[in-house]
Amino acid sequence: MTIKKWIIGFLLVALFALILFTILGFDSSSEQIQMKLNLNPDVTQKVFIKDEVFNKGNKVRFGKENQALKSTDWIEVNLKITYLEDNLNMASVKGTGVIKIGNSTFPFMVEDRLEKYILPSQDVMFYGPIIGEIKTNKGNDELVLDLHHILGTDNKEIAVTVGDLGSDDGVAGLIFGQPFLNKELHDVMNGGAR
Amino acid sequence: MRKKLVILLLVIFVLILDVSPSLASSEFYHKGNAYSSILGSTSYSGSTVVISAGAYYDRNSGQGQADVRVWSRNSQVLNYLGYANNAYNWAEADRYYAIYGSGGTRGDMVLNGTSPLHNTSSSAIVPSFVFDYLNFVVPGAGTLYSFIDATTKYINAQSGVYVVSVSTNKKQVEVRGNDFPIELSSTIGYGEADPKLDPDPYTRGSNAIAGSGAAKFDFSLGSTYTPYPIVFQGRVLYQIFHDMDKAYYGSYTIFSGYATVNEYINGGI
């Protein structure tokens, strides 16, 4: 009698799990990326070296010149990545986020397509721009969020530019996290040596 | 047998007429070259993108075709951003955008299609230097060329082509890849980019232009209204690589400005 109860109980749990699985679904074709990265002032200054463009751009849009940027500033992003049916190496990406500089926060949204790279280690790397819109001190502006990330690892970096080279107000440029692209990874991205 | 042959010839004749009405009647008019300058700069004069635009319009059928070609300025952008142009720092043109549409508020232009044609996320071959029309006319200078150009090349869009509507009567072709060979050398002025206007840069050996981004737009005008205001635009998304410490690259992507040609369709001028 006890065994019978156990079997019935097991079957009920299995049935419940099956119903839950059917309702919620198991979507292997998409994934969620959430990350919060601190600003990297040292790398930001080393990479965005032209003051006339980037100091001006950061000051106009985020209220701080490069020298005033701090490692306590940050970016937070929530991205939903959905692989496309006709090309599993390409994904559509949609998401929202916030950049915090000083005491101010700047919300943004992105929507674009992103290329996926399979590394020799079989790890999955996303490395590329995602276009969106951000509300800054200047108003609504075009955002390029360059996501550099190897899934499941601490290799996480986001390079942000806001505005374009035709703008009178320069271009804002910020680096969050730590760069990890070396020659080998770049060669993988380009399908061979440069 | 003879009857079948006649029918076959008729079918071929009809097909030729159907496929190439534009070739039979097309006379492309150069509508202008343009560049996006580096605005706000006190220390650098240059451009970040160059376009050349042409169009034809058949007043009788109300049908037309427009052509936008886009060139990048990799080395100028790199220099402007403060990097030495060497093996450790470089700029790539990873996306280009060609935009065409009505330049005014009149809503009677319909964009019927583009080439590249369909949205695709896969790799695609995109025509570059396509001058597959019979006559190319520069207003005031007469017909420059009257043959199908033989310099057609192709560039490989590794990541896909996307056609989106910017607005009701404006479309954008976005072509994505890695390191497109569409750079216009610093020694070549924006007005020299189009080989139809000036074939000389294309024969200067080391200064030869490797290719251009290209897109075509089919349109129709609901009325015979001319002149009709039109706009051509182009821009490039650059990926910049900067070797910070000989071990890791700092990299980011940055948009050029828009190069814009505002013109009119005059149905024969």
Image: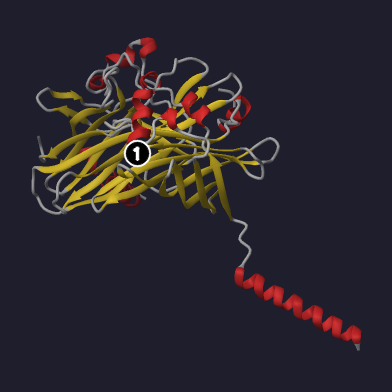
Disc 1 crowd, CA 10 A, few/some/many (<14, 14-19, 20+)? many
Q: Residue furthest front?
A: A103
Which one is nearer the viewer's eye here, B132 or A20? A20
Q: Secondary structure at mark 1?
A: helix
Residue A22, percent from left and from top: 64, 72
Instruction: Report the side of B187 relative to B82 (left or right).
Output: left
Residue toward you, B41 or A5? B41
Q: Is residue A14 above or below residue B248?
A: below
In the figure, B72 relative to A148: above or below?
A: above
Q: How many marks?
A: 1
Q: Which of the image's four quarters has the N terminus of chain A?
A: bottom right
Q: What's under tag 1, amino acid-wise?
A: Arg
Seen in the picture, residue B196 relative to A101 is either above or below; the reply is above
The residue lying toward the viewer, choosing from A72 and A142, is: A72
Residue B73 in sight from this viewpoint: no
Q: Residue A142: name its quadrant.
A: top left
Q: In this rendering, would B30 be left or right of A63?
A: left
Name the residue tied to disc 1. Answer: A61
At a point 28% along the width and 45% down the height, the residue shown is B13
B85 lies left or right of A180 = left
Which chain's residue wears label 1? Answer: A
Specify whether residue A140 is in view: yes
The percent coordinates of residue B94 (x first, y second) are 44, 33
Q: Name the residue at the top extreme.
A: B205
Residue B223 percent across, percent down from the top left: 11, 53
Q: Quadrant of residue B99?
A: top left
Coordinates of residue B101 in the picture (x, y in percent)? 23, 45
Task: For the C terminus of chain A, give its image quadrant.
Answer: top right
Q: How is the image coloured?
A: secondary structure
